[in-house]
Image (tube, rainbow, N blue to C red):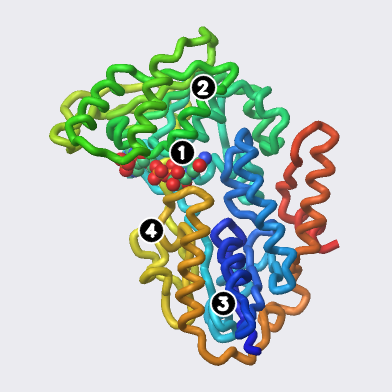
Amino acid sequence: MPNYKIAIVGAGPAGYFTAQAFQKAQNEEFTFSIDMIERLPTPWGLVRSGVAPDHPKIKSVSKVFEKIAQEDSFRLFANVELGKDVSLKDLRENYDAVVLATGSATGRKLGIKGEDLPNCISAADFVPWYNAHPDFKDVSVDLNTDTAVVIGAGNVAMDVARMLALDPTELDLTDTAEHALKIFKTSKIRKVIICGRRGPEHAAFTAPELRDLSKLEHTDVYIDQVQIDQANLRVDKIGEVEKDLRNNLEAMRLIAEQSKKGVERKLEINFLAAPLEIQGSTKVEKIVFAINEVKNGKVSSTDKTFSIKAGLIVTAIGYDAVEYPGVKIENGRIANIAGHVEHNIYVTGWAKRAPVGVIGTNKSDSADVVDLIINSLKEPKNSAGIEALLKSGHKVIDQVGWEKINASEVISGELTGKPRIKEVDWKRLIRLGTS
Ligand code: NAP
């Protein structure tokens, strides 16, 4: 019976759901041997380094990943970097199909003056910093200011704003990076303002995340009722609109109407504010916005501006796929047609479709790509797997190695009631995973 060798690059949700789709597709006619290659010493991608620590339920999908990893058809090769430890060409020649599931990790830029000032930080740096990603442990974050502005009206902006606005004791029983928790505990920030450039009806937040805001115990959340009423009027004029939009507006209306606790920590969501310029001498001090308006369904800027004094600005305006040798980036994605890149190379997840959708979106997306691959499989290649491609002595972290890291982190957390304390040091991670 033919057995096809599959390389999946990237051990995030899209990678695991691809592996799962291959496992499910096996039958009496063919089987698959799946090698998952990951640059970091640890798998789970954004479930480990993206999902906000105060949303642990979302991380429970890692149980599905671990089940996939227990199948005989699956092997993990972590601490193996595509383009450095192994080339795309080598993978292409040695595997029947290569699936790139490398996500989108480069934060998009605003392209405005002052963006490079210290303490204007991209969510692409800030989120992995508080999530103990080993490459971001040294990001310089200064929370010694009373006001922070978060740019963008999506769920990442919401995660970032919540992390900044909540009382840090609410993070005590989470897996927030220890270095970040220490800084959050000394934070002087009492007001966090999310600024979206379009109207409430255009916001990319999802209703469950909006509704979660009212659960913050020590923070009052504000949305201007007038902005929501005007958005509702505009939407009513359109007539029939998607249920998700109605749900979003309803969730925002409830926030606007909700009675406030009168606490000192505040999170405000502001719309129709397009960033124009960031000002400051040695670090960010102020951000200037153009006031936008919505006319006949179109958003345009007015000649009015306003500014906010803020000592921290986080931009959460989306991501682009990371470039590495052998792939072409087009519009922030790996250039592809319905998931096919070229030859036997495919792409899935955010790297394929741009950073949209929640973790579960990757399931159907990856299943489609696996169908496409199966339909184009020919005779299986008789070639060596990845072991033959790596330099001798290369320290691979396999599934057993990862389980050692995982167990060590979970045990460290148990003492303090946390789900885990993440190891942030590359060398220690490799030592733990290869001992
Ligand atoms: P997103 O949902 O695409 O939101 C990006 C936001 O940035 C939009 O409001 C966009 O406004 C704004 N933006 C883009 N360029 C801008 C500019 N130059 N100036 C001002 N604003 C700008 O992206 P995301 O928040 O990074 O989230 C990525 C995906 O992950 C989404 O699908 C999200 O739902 C998902 N996610 C889910 C969760 C969860 O379920 N808990 C958590 C985090 C992320 P325009 O619309 O005007 O372009």
Q: CA distance from mark 2 to mark 4?
A: 34 Å
Q: Residues within 10 Å of mark 2 (few under 14, many from 20)?
A: some
Q: Quick one: label 2 or label 4, which is nearer the N terminus?
A: 2
Q: Which residue is mark 3?
A: 87
Q: Quick one: label 3 or label 2, which is nearer the N terminus?
A: 3
Q: CA distance from mark 3 to mark 2?
A: 48 Å
User: Which kind of residue does numbered mark 3 sit on?
Assistant: Ser
Who's the residue at 35% across and 38% down the image? 243
Q: CA distance from mark 4 to mark 3?
A: 21 Å
In the picture provided, is 196 more to the left or to the right than 371? left
Q: Nearer the viewer, mark 2 or mark 4?
A: 2
Who's the residue at 80% across and 38% down the image? 413
Q: Position of residue 99 (x, y in %)?
A: 53, 71
Q: Which residue is mark 4?
A: 332
Q: Nearer the viewer, residue 11 or 184?
A: 11
In the picture provided, is 357 more to the left or to the right than 435? left
Q: Quadrant of residue 400?
A: bottom right
Q: Quick one: label 4 or label 3, which is nearer the N terminus?
A: 3
Q: Is mark 1 within 8 Å of ligand 1?
A: yes
Q: Quadrant of residue 225?
A: top left
Q: Which residue is mark 2?
A: 214
Q: Is mark 3 within 8 Å of ligand 1?
A: no
Q: Considering the numbered disc 2 on the image, is that residue within a helix, a strand or a loop?
A: helix
Q: CA distance from mark 1 to mark 4?
A: 19 Å
